[in-house]
Image (cartoon, rainbow, N blue to C red):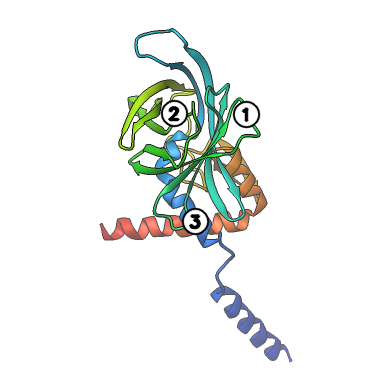
Amino acid sequence: MKQVFAVLLCVAGAFWSSTSPATEPKQLVNDKKLLAPLQAYVGEWRGIGLPKRGSNQGAWSETAEWTWKFAEDRAALVATLRPGKYFERLEVRPDATGATLVVDAFEAKSPESPVVHYRGKLKDSELEATAVDSPEGLPARITIRLVAGGDRMLVLYERRLSPDSFARMAEVGSTRKGSSFAKQATSGPECVVTGGMGTIAVEHDGKTYFVCCGGCKDLFEEDPVAVLADYRERKAAEKAKQATD
C-alpha cells in the first residue's frame, strides 16, 4: 500500500511540475512591452508652462505625476496634471492592434466634456500624438520628450494651421523630482512589473520585492503570483539572449 501511495505522489508531482504557473494575460504583457520605452516618464515632475519662448507673459506652474495603470488585463501610462492648462489627465495606451499608441486627454476646465483622442507614434522615448478631432482652443498635436539624461521633460502643445502644418500654443518644461527616480534600472532594485527602477517595497510569501509606482504596487498586490511568474520568465529570456549575443 505504501508503494502504491508513493507512486501516486510521484505521478502527482510530475503533473504539477509540468504545469506552468499562472502568468499575466498575454494582452497585458504585450501592452507593458509596447509602453516600456516610456518607462522613464514615471515619476513626479514640476514645471513651468510658457506660451511664448523667452517670455513669462501668460506663464503658469504645473506638476505632473506619471504612473502605470492596470485595468481589465490592459496597461496604460497615466499623467495627472495639476493644474493643467489644457488637460487634467493624459492616458497613453497601445491601440487594439498594437501598431500605434492612443492618447486620451481629459479636459481640465470641463470634466464633463468629451475625451479628446490622439493617435501617436514613438521614437525612442519621444511621443508625438495628433488629435483625431480636436475641439476649438485645444491642442491638435502633443509632443513629449525627455532631455538632460531624462531629468527634464518637455511637453509641446500645438494648434493646427493646415492638414500638415502646426504652430506652437505653449510648452511645459519640467524637472524630475529626484534625479534618478523611475529611470530604467541599471543598478539597485528593479521593478518586478515593468523593469524600471524599484522605489516601493512590496512583500509576498515572506520575501521583499520592489515596484516603481502606485499602479504597479496595486497590480502586484492583486496577483503577486502572476506578476512574479512573468518577471521570472522575462529574466530567463534576458539571460538566454545574453548567452547568445
Nearer to the camera, 54 or 177: 54
Alpha carbons under labels 3 and 2: distance apart = 25 Å
Residue 84 in picture, x, y percent from top left: 55, 24
Task: Name the element at disc 1.
Answer: loop
Nearer to the camera, 74 or 200: 74
Alpha carbons under labels 1 and 3: distance apart = 34 Å
In the image, 34: left or right of 212? left
Kindly identify which residue carries mark 1. Answer: 110
Q: Quadrant of the C terminus?
A: bottom left
At label 1, counting other C-alpha atoms closer than 10 Å, the crowd grade (few under 14, some 14-19, many 20 or more) is few
Residue 186 visible to an observer of this rendering: no
- Compare marks 2 and 1 and give the one earlier in the sequence: 1
Q: Residue at x 45, y 34 (%)?
A: 41
Q: Nearer the viewer, mark 3 or mark 2?
A: 3
Q: Nearer the viewer, mark 2 or mark 1?
A: 1
Alpha carbons under labels 2 and 1: distance apart = 35 Å
Kindly identify which residue carries mark 2. Answer: 180
Residue 164 in picture, x, y percent from top left: 30, 36
Residue 118 in picture, x, y percent from top left: 46, 41
Specify the amino acid type for callout 2. Ser
At label 3, counting other C-alpha atoms closer than 10 Å, the crowd grade (few under 14, some 14-19, many 20 or more) is some
Task: Name the element at disc 2.
Answer: loop
At label 2, counting other C-alpha atoms closer than 10 Å, the crowd grade (few under 14, some 14-19, many 20 or more) is some
Mark number, residue 29: 3
